Image: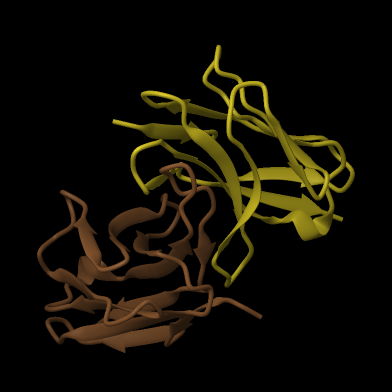
Chain colours: A brown, B yellow
């Protein structure tokens, strides 16, 4: 089945130690997103790629970076994780229609803990 | 900017009860509206959507009607089941961009 896959499911890192989260998709969708979801809060968009075009949200900290080497893969790099970066990180894809995203397809998420 | 406001939870119901989860939005133009559901330990998945005023989205017994006059998209189900226990997110997507804005989510518990 076509899907969005995130690895690992759980990631533990140390304060200040760089960490990379991975996302792959078999849907061949143009747009890939990274959301941060903290407990009992709305998913917060960090950035998205439309093909190779990177779009950063204005309030996304510089500590968060992303790479999309090809259509299928997208990575989230946290350069120096702080305790406040502990969260669920959700990858999503979409195939835009009519100039907007009509449906997002989500992975199961990576739960990041920072010790 | 665009935003979504939904009722706070948790909502606790007995099986076969009627469910309403309120959602209102603020947006310029004519957004598409969505309800997503998140089961424990999983990512979000689309439950239903509506793309223009007065459209009704429906799926798995859930319904929501796009009300432009009240800027609302309330989720309803006539008879909930234990398996409906999850977190429900209202969301919107505006034209001219590829961002989906989510509400804070409403946790639903259904008791047998």
| Location of residue A60 by image quarter | bottom left
Q: Residue at x 83, y 44 (%)?
A: B61
Q: Nearer the viewer, residue A77 or A2?
A: A2
Q: Nearer the viewer, residue B9 or B64?
A: B64
Horizontal and vertical percent for residue B75?
68, 35
- On-image quarter of the C terminus of chain A: bottom left
Q: Is residue B60 above or below residue A92?
A: above
- Does residue B103 appear left or right of residue A38 in this picture? right
Q: Residue furthest front?
A: A98
Q: Is residue A11 above or below residue B39?
A: below
Q: Residue at x 79, y 60 (%)?
A: B83
Q: Is residue B11 above or below residue A44?
A: above
Regarding residue B9, the answer to whether it shows in the image is: no
- On-image quarter of the N terminus of chain A: bottom right
| Location of residue A43 by image quarter | bottom left
Q: How many marks?
A: 0
Horizontal and vertical percent for residue A105?
53, 63
Horizontal and vertical percent for residue B49?
63, 41
Horizontal and vertical percent for residue B89?
55, 47
Q: Residue at x 37, y 60 (%)?
A: A38
- Does residue A103 appear left or right of residue A74 in this picture? right
Q: Residue furthest top?
A: B69
Q: Nearer the viewer, residue A1 or A43?
A: A1
Regarding residue A40, the answer to whether it shows in the image is: yes
């Amino acid at each position: 089945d076509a899907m969005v896959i995130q690895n690992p499911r759980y990631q533990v890192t140390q304060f200040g130690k760089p960490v990379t989260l991975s996302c792959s998709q078999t849907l061949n969708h143009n747009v890939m997103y990274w959301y941060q979801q903290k407990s009992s809060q709305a998913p917060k968009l960090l950035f998205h790629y439309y093909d190779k075009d990177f779009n950063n949200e204005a309030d996304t900290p510089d500590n968060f970076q992303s790479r999309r080497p090809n259509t299928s893969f997208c990575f989230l790099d946290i350069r120096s994780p702080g305790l406040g970066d502990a969260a669920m990180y959700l990858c999503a894809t979409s195939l835009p229609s009519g100039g907007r995203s009509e449906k997002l397809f989500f992975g199961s998420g990576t739960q990041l803990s920072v010790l | 900017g665009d935003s979504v406001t939904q009722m706070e939870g948790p909502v606790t119901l007995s099986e076969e009860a009627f469910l309403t989860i309120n959602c209102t939005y603020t947006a310029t133009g004519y957004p598409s509206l969505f309800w997503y559901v998140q089961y424990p330990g999983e990512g979000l998945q689309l439950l239903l959507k509506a793309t223009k005023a007065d459209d009704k989205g429906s799926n798995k017994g859930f319904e929501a009607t796009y009300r432009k006059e009240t800027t609302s998209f309330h989720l309803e189900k006539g008879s909930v089941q234990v398996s409906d226990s999850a977190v429900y997110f209202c969301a919107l997507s505006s034209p001219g961009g590829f961002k989906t804005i989510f509400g804070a989510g409403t946790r639903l518990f259904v008791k047998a």
